[in-house]
Image: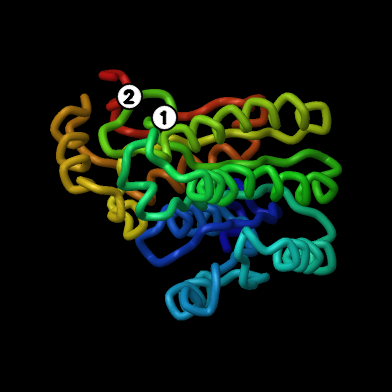
Amino acid sequence: MPVNGPLHGKRGLVIGIANDRSIGWGCAQALRDAGAELAATWQDERARPHVAPLLEGLPVTIAQPLDVRAPAQMQALFDAIATRWGSLDFLVHSVAFAPRQDLHGRVVDSSADGFALAMDVSCHSFIRLAKLAEPLMPHGGSLVTMSYLGAEDVVDRYGLMGPVKAALESSVRYLAAELGPAGIRVNAISPGPVDTRAASGLAGFEALLAQAEQRAPMRRLVGIDEVGALCAFLVGEGARSITGDTHYLDAGFHLLS
């Protein structure tokens, strides 16, 4: 951990590391490289073999399982943070899910259960995490989540996740207004399509990647390291007056929508 890194002395939690191609992993690496001490999670026992070795190599101080749908696991994680650290400087939320049948179909055909599950995991989990983080941030802090252009514009075959990410971005604004008096900042990062294993579950994802690379003003895609670099900036002192925004990181692709 760099002694003179810009985040030296900061402690934070990263939720959503799935493997070494995930956006959560890119954020964890950048935050650690900037000097932060980290806590991180894996979703379940099936994910543990893919995540635990990464966390050991980073390394992280606190590593626990967390299914964001499990209140007891979430509470246990924050209890561990309170016991070990006593406070928290930042939280990064990089979690999204929708049932495949609902994700690959039309929004108008989405099931009530599928829509509710996607909203719970992808949006309301961020709100629940914010609620638990708030008392651990008595001197302020930073909360960051991940969105996508489909929250604002209709993106072909992004489907159900469009309305869900729109709700997430709206939640960012409301949380920023509510938590701002306590010095807690809340922001969203909206990367362009990133070649992650999770994103590959979207129908036509390869075509989406190709279109972004061909049409973006900079004629390239973004990588998880770039998302991590922006995340590290947003939780640092240089962004101490930035809150309630969605920050595009897509080589300029959003300008064309």
Q: Is residue 197 left or right of residue 97?
A: left
Question: Residue 67's quadrant in the figure?
Answer: bottom right
Q: Is residue 232 visible?
A: no
Vertical side of 125 occupied by 25: above or below: below
User: Label for residue 192?
Assistant: none
Q: Is residue 117 visible?
A: yes
Q: How is this picture coloured?
A: rainbow
Residue at (22%, 28%) from the top-left corner? 216
If the image is split into quadrants, where does the C terminus sit?
Answer: top left
Q: Amino acid at mark 1?
A: Tyr
- Please tell me which residue lies in front, 29 or 65: 65
Residue bearing mark 2:
254
Q: Is residue 119 left or right of residue 224?
A: right
Dots 2, 1 in contact, CB < 8 A: yes
**Secondary structure of the residue carrying numbered label 1:** strand
**Secondary structure of the residue carrying numbered label 2:** helix
Residue at (33%, 33%) from the top-left corner? 250
Residue bearing mark 1:
248
- Please tell me which residue lies in front, 111 or 43: 111
Vertical side of 245 occupied by 26: above or below: below
Residue at (51%, 52%) from the top-left corner? 95
> Residues under labels 2 and 1: Cα distance?
7 Å
Question: Residue 211's quadrant in the figure?
Answer: top left
* Spot occupied by residue 123 in the image (x, y as percentages of width and height): 58, 42
Vertical side of 90 occupied by 43: above or below: below
If the image is split into quadrants, where does the N terminus sit?
Answer: bottom right
Residue at (55%, 73%) from the top-left corner? 44
* Spot occupied by residue 188 in the image (x, y as percentages of width and height): 53, 35
Q: Amino acid at mark 2?
A: His
* Spot occupied by residue 223 in the image (x, y as percentages of width and height): 32, 48
